[in-house]
Image: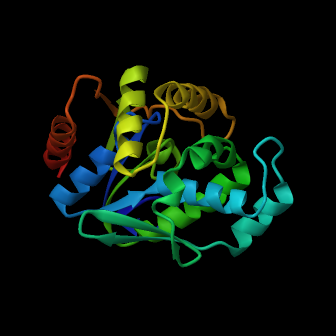
């Protein structure tokens, strides 16, 4: 067992995967978790659910409504259920696994997740879900803020156009129509926004291992990270 700090829960083993949008974090994290029989903590999905709640409540990303943000952090319940290899995201007891992947939510998630009050609240939610488990988790600040004492830290990166192509394919598989140029612009915006925000910006932890997935297949990505984790185990 590893003590992750004064306010962190006791977690058996943490694999923290950080990186930009579309770099392969989610797919790799899911695959590694399944192979190791670890719990997959989809932190990105939790932020997406929060952005969805904000939009559904009438909030605008052009001018953040802090009163609404405060209301959301006080009255919102986000939970993750793992069914074999599938992760279901519940927002106030409703399964929103499909709704959180729409372009509308994608455009809102970075501004919403940059709000310090949202991030501080979300870190508590993520640590609570992780308590008592072996986990694989991915996001922007997992290895630097959420679980700074994670036994394995990975920082994933990939060519921007490759990432856009992957995202379009992912959306197509979910029957969500998208345009690659629009997706590419969204990824560029999220990269710049996530890296430059003042609170918990996207950055590589000093002890993270860099994995470039540009020329790797999904299976190769998963196998590489799995190998790194097993060596640590």
Classify residue 13 as left or right of residue 144: left
How many dots with numbers?
Answer: 0
Write the residue at 81% across / 48% down.
64
Q: Is residue 186 left or right of residue 95?
A: right
The image quarter in which residue 185 lies: top right
Position of the N terminus by quadrant: bottom left
Figure coloring: rainbow
Frontmost residue, 118 versus 100: 100
Task: From the viewer's side, name the closer residue of 50 and 229.
Answer: 50
Question: Residue at coordinates 40% horizontally, 67% vertically from top-left?
Answer: 88
Q: Residue furthest bottom?
A: 93
Relative horizontal placement of residue 7, taking residue 204 as reference (left or right): right
* Residue 223 versus residue 92 in the image, above or below: above
For this rendering, which residue is in front, 185 or 132?
185
Q: Quadrant of residue 191?
A: top right
- The spot of residue 72 in percent (x, y) is 72, 66
The correct choice, above or below, for 78 with respect to 27 in the image is below
Q: Residue at x 56, y 54 (%)?
A: 48
- Does residue 197 appear in the picture of this structure? yes
Q: Height in image: 212 above or below 208?
A: above
Left or right, 81 with reference to 183: left
The answer to which image quadrant residue 214 occupies is top left
Q: Residue 198, image x and y in percent? A: 69, 35
Task: Work out whether residue 7 can be spotted.
Answer: no
Residue 173 screen position, x and y as percent: 34, 48
């Amino acid at each position: 067992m590893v003590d992750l700090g004064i306010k962190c829960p006791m977690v058996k083993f943490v694999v923290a995967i950080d990186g930009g949008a579309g770099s392969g974090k989610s797919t790799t994290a899911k695959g590694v978790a399944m192979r190791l029989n670890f719990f997959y903590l989809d932190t990105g999905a939790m932020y997406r659910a929060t952005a969805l709640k904000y939009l559904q409540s009438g909030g605008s990303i052009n001018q953040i409504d802090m009163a609404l943000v405060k209301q959301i952090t006080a009255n919102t319940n986000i939970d993750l259920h793992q069914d074999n290899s599938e992760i279901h995201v519940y927002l106030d007891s409703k399964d929103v696994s499909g709704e959180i992947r729409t372009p509308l939510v994608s455009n809102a998630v970075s501004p919403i997740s940059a709000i310090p009050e949202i991030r501080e609240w979300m870190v508590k939610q993520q640590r609570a879900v992780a308590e008592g488990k072996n986990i694989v988790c991915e996001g922007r600040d997992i290895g630097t803020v959420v679980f700074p004492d994670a036994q394995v830290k990975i920082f994933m990166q990939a060519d921007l156009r490759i990432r856009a192509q992957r995202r379009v394919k992912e959306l197509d598989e979910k029957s969500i129509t998208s345009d690659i140029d629009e997706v590419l612009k969204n990824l560029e915006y999220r990269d710049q926004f996530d890296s430059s925000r003042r609170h918990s910006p996207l950055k590589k932890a000093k002890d993270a291992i860099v994995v470039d997935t540009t020329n790797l297949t999904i299976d190769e990505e998963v196998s590489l990270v799995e190998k790194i984790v097993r060596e640590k185990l």
